[in-house]
Structure formats: structure tokens, C-alpha cells
Amino acid sequence: MKIEFVDAASETAVLAVLVHEDRSLSQPARTYDEQTGGALMRAVNAGRFTGGKGQTLSVAAPQGLLAPQLLAVGAGPKDGFDELAAEAAAAQAFQAVKTSGAETLAIDVRDLSPVLAARAAFGARLGAYRFDKYLTKEKPEKKPSIATVQIVVSDAAAARAAYEPLSAIADAVVFSRDLVSEPANVLYPQEFARRCKELERLGLTVEVLGEAEMAELGMHMLLGVGQGSRRDSQLVVMRWNGAADPNAQPIAFVGKGVCFDTGGISIKPADGMEDMKWDMGGAAAVAGLMHALAGRKARANVVGILGLVENMPDGNAQRPGDVVASMSGQTVEIINTDAEGRLVLGDALWYCKQRFQPKFMIDLATLTGAMIIALGNDYAGVFSNDDAVANAILAAGAGEGENVWRMPLPAQYEKQIDSAIADMKNTGGRAGGSITAALFLQRFVDGTPWAHIDIAPTAWKKDSKTPTVPDGAAGWGVRLLNRLVADGFEG
């Protein structure tokens, strides 16, 4: 979809204007109301449209305008209208008319600052995402017709300049969503790694370690997860050196990339197993972050590590009761082969710490169903050994509308993952399942400031209530992590 910043809308465009709570018209809305002889306000007053967030109201072929449709978009309270509200309103406008048959949507925000206008464009871009590459018989009326979104502004050059870094972030979110949306027969570890390698065109340095290299490093936890698959496991190392000193200590992000998770020998129920193609959402978020940082030329040194595997149940698969050695030298008794993500992350975290000695590490993973039970579908859980890192995550999440909630790491739960025959077990049972998973990961950070974000609730949306996040892959985490880097670690 094309984004344009213009001084006036095309004559054939659907016109969208903002209406705030209590039916308070924005300045452009008042102008169009006057031009239509009060038609907009009459329509607003005739029903239950109040200007609340998420509401839209259409006036078809309004007299006095050439536009085929005038769309009122609820923008919520005028006093609280911020960047996220601008994004949501523009995305809601797109959702309302995307299959209308019109080809152009013009959102008139001439009374907003260039920054808010740019955010409106950003919201429309994110809201327009759809993964349709495998649809071959879709009816024409089901396909979005809007090909161009015009943002009508008072200073097009300033809005365009404000949108430039947002456009790079949008590209990265789309990249992440595409990764998560792909079926596992298309996106397996080697293909995921190949797509990451292609990002070297943006200036990233990308290395790919194969199974032989990981075996030499002693990464037998990660390799054990993938040994039942005919697809080779991969470790992708992505680097962006944008700081003034390219040798300055980096910050690091680690992503779980289980490209398909059957559960292994501890096989999952068949119902819903198709969703396990998105068990690589953490790795997709980290890859998307690196895409965003390179795309907007971030002034920071950042490392991204992706552990990419398939968890399959063939004759060579890892068994419950097996004992494996990690790269750290610690041993793990496998109790449940479906508790595989922590094995992948444990080796990836240790590798990251040993090689790069980062200021801190943050891992992202669709790690536990228990996190969905605890927090529902709109919050990711944050576990951390460092208050500063945790607080930075919470602040970035609030700023980008990606909700997070800090969870405890109580030492008394450690005994749940103690093993009689190894240094630890890979699961501590049902009670506190998300907590014991995080405690397992903490054993592989060796005192480095660290946080674990369990994105099981947020990586994939069904019946999304957020207009900038269509149903399916959310690309969750790209915006939060980018904001964290931008706000605290660019100088």
C-alpha cells in the first residue's frame, strides 16, 4: 500500500476526518460539515456515534463534496489524543473502507502536528497488513481495494520527514509478521536463516552456524531439540554496529525460533497444533528489531541471536528421561520434550554472553501456555534479574502500546527444577509453570543483567481488537524493542 503526504485530497478519494468524544468535530471535520450544509453533524447526531475510539460513521456521496464518501472516525478524548491514538484512528479508517471499492483513502489531519500526522500514516500502514500470498480463489469483493492512503497535512515535507524512520519500523514489523505467518513447510530453520542473511543489504552483519559448529561449541540442549527433524538446526547471529565506537559494548536480544513444535515425543494434542508454526515468534521479533535498527540507522551497537529448530517426533528424537549437556557445562534431565524452547534459549543465551559480553540480554519467546492462563491474550510477561532492564521494557511497552506485566522470580521455586540425576530438569510441573521456565533460563545468564519476555499471549491474534494489528501474526515486540533501544541506548 502506498502512503502519500499531500496538501489536498484527490477528488475521488474517500475522505476521513476525526471526531472526538462527545461529538466534538476536528477542524477539518468542521470544514467539511460546512461544505455539506451540516450533513456530517446531522448524521453524527442521528445515532449512537459519539466519537469514541473504534467508532466510524459514513456519509455517502455528501452534497457539496466530490468525494464518494465522508467518513467520521472516532478519535476518543481530545485531551488524550496522542501518538497511539493517531495510529489507531487512521488504522480504523482504513479498516472501515478497505473493501469499499474505492482505491484511495484520504485522512484529513491538517490540524495535527507533523509528528502526529506521521503516526497516522504509520497506523494505516500497519493496519493494512494482510498475508494473502497463498490465496488463489479469493472473491474480488473480499480483496482490499484501497491502494493509496493520503495523509492530508498542513506541512507535507515535515510530516514526510517524521514518517521516514517510522516507515523503516513498519517495514520491519511487516517482515516479522511475514515470518510468523509462513507455514512450516516453507519457513524451516534454513529458510529462516536465509531470509535473515538477505538483510545484509541493509548493512547488518549476519552469520549462520550449522549443526557441526554448534556441536563443537557444546550446544547439545539446542541440538537435542532438533535431532528428530530432517531439517538442520541453525543459530543466526545478527549484528548492527551503529554507535560512534563500533567496538563499544553491545546490548543483546535472543529469540526462540522453533519453526514448528509438535511437542516431540511428548506430542501435543492434534487440535490446534497447526498454530505451532508461530512458535518462532520470539526469533521473528528479534529479526524484525534488527531490520528496524538497520533500516533507520540506529546509533547503537546491537546483537541479535536466533536459535532455529524444529521439534519433531521421529526415531531419532529426544526422549523423556534423556540427559543432555549444555554449552555452559550444566546438565539437564529431559522430563517433557514439549518444554523445548528453554533448551534452545539456554544455549543461545550462554553463547551470547560468552562471545559478546553484552551490557544486558533480553530474550523473547512463545515459551509457556501458562503465561496465557496468567495474563490472558493482551499482555506479555516480563521476568528479570535487573530492575533497570525490567523498567526499560515496561516503559517502552507503554509507549508503543505493546502491553507487558512484570512477573516474580522467587528463589523458593528453584527446587521445582532440581533433578535427582542432573543439574536441573527442563520442567518444574504445572504450578508456576511460566516462573519455573524463567528460572531455568536464569541459570544460563551467569549474572549478566537479563530479562525474559514470554510472548505466548501476544505473538498471534485471533479476533484482534487493535486496528493496527489484524488477525494473525502481530509482529509483537519489534516496536517495543526498537523503542527501548531508541530511548535508552542511542547517543
Image (cartoon, rainbow, N blue to C red):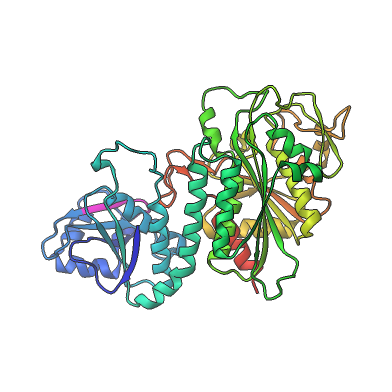
Q: Which residue lies at the image location 27% right of the left edge and 41% below the top edge?
A: 142
Question: Is residue 432 at least partly visible in the picture?
Answer: no
Q: Which residue lies at the image location 51% right of the left edge and 27% below the top edge?
A: 272
Quadrant of res 456: top right
Viewer-proximal residue, 93 or 314?
314
Please, is residue 239 above or below residue 403 in the view?
Answer: below
Is 53 part of what is drawn in magenta? yes
Q: Which residue lies at the image location 58% right of the left edge and 63% below the top edge?
A: 293
Quadrant of res 264: top right
| Outermost residue, left side | 63
| Outermost residue, front side | 212
Question: Is residue 99 at least partly visible in the picture?
Answer: yes
* 292 sits left or right of 442 in the view: left
Quadrant of res 323: top right
Viewer-proximal residue, 344 or 470?
344
Is 320 part of what is drawn in magenta? no
Please, is residue 349 above or below residue 440 in the view?
Answer: below
Q: Position of residue 475 (x, y in %)?
A: 52, 49
In the picture, which quadrant includes the C terminus? bottom right
Q: Count of labels shown? A: 0
Span shown in magenta: 52-58
* 483 sits left or right of 140 in the view: right
* 460 sits left or right of 133 in the view: right
Q: Position of residue 315 (x, y in %)?
A: 69, 22
Q: Which residue lies at the image location 71% right of the left edge and 44% below the top edge?
A: 345
Q: Position of residue 167 (x, y in %)?
A: 45, 64
Q: Position of residue 48 (x, y in %)?
A: 27, 48
Please, is residue 87 above or below residue 276 in the view?
Answer: below
* 398 sits left or right of 26 in the view: right
